[in-house]
Image (cartoon, helix red, strand yellow):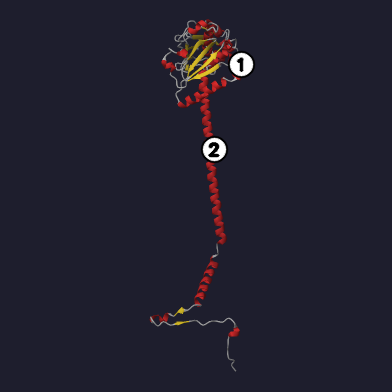
Amino acid sequence: MAYLERSSPTLKETLLKIYHAEKPFEIDQHFYEFGSIQYHIKCSVLDPNIAYVSTSTLLETQGTVILKEISNHTYEVIEKIAVGVIDIVDPPRLGFQLTLRLHLDNIPRGKEAIKIITRISEIQALMLSSQLKEMLRNLNFQDDSQLANRPIKIVYHPSQPFYVFKQLEKITAVFPMNFKDNSDVVIATSFFQELVEVGSQKEMGKAPQCNWSPIPPLQLRGEPVQDLITNSGFVSFDITSRHVEGRRLDQTVWNLLNFYAYVKYHIKCSRGYVQRRMRKRMDSLVKLLNNTSLEEEETTQKENGRCKYLKELVKVPKGNLMMKQRCKEMTRRVKISKFRIKINGCARFRFHQRWKSLPKFFSNPSDKSYTKLD
């Protein structure tokens, strides 16, 4: 599978480590990238100025063009990366498509060294793009006799093949899309539909026309069934002659090789964006709930404070309270004294109880009568 960055990060880091090493050291490293691209780096202490880099990819191609072999044009492009620094070893290391001999002592010092090593780490991307370029060059847009040819299946990764076939005045590239997670299927399907809608606008008239369909195109009839079973449909791009002229050829080829990587990158960014929005929304809800709880606590505290303050205002001292109770009792007794009272001494006479009334007291002194004594 092609990737968004042309240079291999592991290969670049290892070559820079060998180049900047103060003391020579021996290295024999074998690693893979994306499951289908493999590298091998070897450097000996006996000859520290020479390093060997081997690379290959697991290509499986069906059609008129055989992509497993590296063309002479690709060899010429690789040798021009750094004249005097790169030599192509023939035959290559067993199990690899290409082996390069690097003369580290011929690499200039400074920033130029980083540029050369970066370009050397782009070998695999250069091989993949050059093979697809060669195929597009062999497909003549004006030759209608190639319409009867079978689609060319290109497999840069076992689970990510795509097809290229000739149509009238254009070449169509079809990408079967499969994803493991259901959420990825939803995001990818929405993205494809939006891509078709944007591509149909007038502003995008010069770009390759994009189409999406849940079923494979008719030109793919007869291909293996396992390659045509998808859960996200088929995305196709129509490439015309103007898209492969001059420098546009490099950009077109690179975009086709990185389409799977770009879709995965978009899905990953979309999922990250959705998760960030969900976390942000959750934080805002939690903050709102916390603020509501604090406001309720403050309201309760204020009400309790008011009640306490009122109780303190109404509170009567203990001595005054006792005096008030005594006054109430005396008032009650005075009120009772105005009515007839029962003499408890006569209680034994059940039917002959005697009742007496208290004398009336006159408050006006003129009503009193008295006899003057001599």
Regarding mark 2 in the picture, which secondary structure is present there?
A: helix
* Image quadrant assignment for residue 121: top right
Q: Earlier in the sequence, mark 2 or mark 1?
A: 1
- Distance from label 2 to label 1 (Cα)? 48 Å
Residue 225 in view:
yes
Mark 2, Cα crowd under 10 Å, few <14 / some 14-19 / many 20+, is few
Mark 1, Cα crowd under 10 Å, few <14 / some 14-19 / many 20+, is few
- Quadrant placement of the C terminus: bottom right
Coordinates of residue 18 in the picture (x, y in percent): 53, 15
- The amino acid type found where label 2 is placed reads Ser
Q: Which mark is residue 284?
A: 2
Coordinates of residue 346 in the picture (x, y in percent): 41, 82
| Tag 1 residue | 111
- The amino acid type found where label 1 is placed reads Lys
The residue lying toward the viewer, choosing from 23 and 350, is 350
Coordinates of residue 12 in the picture (x, y in percent): 54, 16
The residue lying toward the viewer, choosing from 335 and 121, is 335
Q: Are marks 2 and 1 in contact (CB under 8 Å)?
A: no
Coordinates of residue 29 in the picture (x, y in percent): 47, 15
The answer to whether residue 1 is above or below residue 345 is above
Q: Which residue is pictured at 56% across the width and 58% down the height? A: 310
Regarding mark 1 in the picture, which secondary structure is present there?
A: helix
Residue 6 in view:
no
Q: Which mark is residue 297?
A: none
